[in-house]
Image: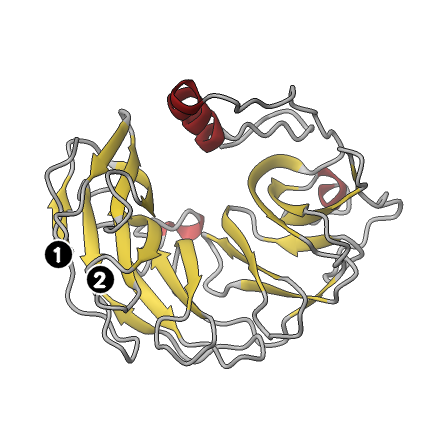
């Protein structure tokens, strides 16, 4: 979601839905009023939380689709801003001063014009959280390797993931103890009118922050969002994909070696935007919740990896 204000005003809709729907049932759940943080870049689009400086407190990274400060230097790309926890319900951001326009910069890192996703995990197993970001008009993932003090180094080998990447999950899909990337590449590419890869890409991790070449799989038309879980209960991580233009959900079951089986598709009444996995009717079987253009749909697992019609 884009916000024309230069201030960062993030509303956690998922939390709101959870609290509004669940708190009346269980009680005792409340939140303080939100605090506006105003020194981020223009159009903050995505956010990821983690302890980036290893002090035991959660920090967050914001992916901006346009950075005013960079734009003033003729750099019309976005940025990744790092906000560190002050341990008093406030967050600090190092003043840019003279803007650093070449990544890596102290607590401000370059990103593309049309960012689509950011997430965090320890990709090189050094005990520090790293960042992965996607941009619709960049075929490589942005990988920032954490230094453990709130600063990051850009990867020297950003992996090719495909055209128009929209979303990803980081999971150990091939059971080797190393995180892999599974990326949903969309159909649309904004700059130049090019066509996106329109597929699912699996990149096995090497354990050092680098990844092997992508192996591609078909899903539906214009994959927008991706989620993971052991959907059929066989001990392997499976993939659920929300396909916008074909208005369906694709399930790609995985083999123990990380390869994916052909997609099984489930129709939706409206084009999906986001899919998540969770236990929504018992604690045994992975279900799906889907944000669509008209509302929220839930697909309940039959217990064998197949799903009931949307509710």
When the figure is inspected, residue 71 is found, relative to residue 186, above or below; the finding is above
Residue 289 visible? The answer is yes
User: From the viewer's perspective, is 118 left or right of 33?
Assistant: left
The image position of residue 72, as x and y in percent, is 76, 41
Identify which residue is drawn at 13% across, 51% down: 265
Question: Which residue lies under the disc numbered 2?
Answer: 233
Whole-number angstrom distance, CA of label 2 to CA of label 1: 7 Å
Identify which residue is drawn at 20% across, 47% down: 249
Identify which residue is drawn at 53% across, 51% down: 118
The image position of residue 254, as x and y in percent, is 24, 69
When the figure is inspected, residue 300 is found, relative to residue 14, above or below; the finding is below
Residue 220 visible? The answer is no
Count neighbours of disc 1 (C-alpha within 10 A) and say few if under 14, some if 14 to 19, many if 20 or more: few
Disc 1 is placed on an element classified as: loop
Disc 2 is placed on an element classified as: loop
When the figure is inspected, residue 41 is found, relative to residue 151, above or below; the finding is above
Count neighbours of disc 2 (C-alpha within 10 A) and say few if under 14, some if 14 to 19, many if 20 or more: some
When the figure is inspected, residue 140 is found, relative to residue 164, above or below; the finding is below
Q: Are marks 2 and 1 in contact (CB under 8 Å)?
A: yes
Q: Nearer the viewer, residue 302 or 36?
A: 302
User: From the viewer's perspective, is 163 left or right of 57?
Assistant: left
Question: Which residue lies under the disc numbered 1?
Answer: 304
**Residue 59, disc:** none
The image position of residue 184, as x and y in percent, is 34, 57
* Mark nearer the N terminus (2 vs 1): 2
User: From the viewer's perspective, is 111 left or right of 21?
Assistant: right
What sort of colour scheme is used for the picture? secondary structure
| The quadrant where residue 91 appears | top right
């Amino acid at each position: 979601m884009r916000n024309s204000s230069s201030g960062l005003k993030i509303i956690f809709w998922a939390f709101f839905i959870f609290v509004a729907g669940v708190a009346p049932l269980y009680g005792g759940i409340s939140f303080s009023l939100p605090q506006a943080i105003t020194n981020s870049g223009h159009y903050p689009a995505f956010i990821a939380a983690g302890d980036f400086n290893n002090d035991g407190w959660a920090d967050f990274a914001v992916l901006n689709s346009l950075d005013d400060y960079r734009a003033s230097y003729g750099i019309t790309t976005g940025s990744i801003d790092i906000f560190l926890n002050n341990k008093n319900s406030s967050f600090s951001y190092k003043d840019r001063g003279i803007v650093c326009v070449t990544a890596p910069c102290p607590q401000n890192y370059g990103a593309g014009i049309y960012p689509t996703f950011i997430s965090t995990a320890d990709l090189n197993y050094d005990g520090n959280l790293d960042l992965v970001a996607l941009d619709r008009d960049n075929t490589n993932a942005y990988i920032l390797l954490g230094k453990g003090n709130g600063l990051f180094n850009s990867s020297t080998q950003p992996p090719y993931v495909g055209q128009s990447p929209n979303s990803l999950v980081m999971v150990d899909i091939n059971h080797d103890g190393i995180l892999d990337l599974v990326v949903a590449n969309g159909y649309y590419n904004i700059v130049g009118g090019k066509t996106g890869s329109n597929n699912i890409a699996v990149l096995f991790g090497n354990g050092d922050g680098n990844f092997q070449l992508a192996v591609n799989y078909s899903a539906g038309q214009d994959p927008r969002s991706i989620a993971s879980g052991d959907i059929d209960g066989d001990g392997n991580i499976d993939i659920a994909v929300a396909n916008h233009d074909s208005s369906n959900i694709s399930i790609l079951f995985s083999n123990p070696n990380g390869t994916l089986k052909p997609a099984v598709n489930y129709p939706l009444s409206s084009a999906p935007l986001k899919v998540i996995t969770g236990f929504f009717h018992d604690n045994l079987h992975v279900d799906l919740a889907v944000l669509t253009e008209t509302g929220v749909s839930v697909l309940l697992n039959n217990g064998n990896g197949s799903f009931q019609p949307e509710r």
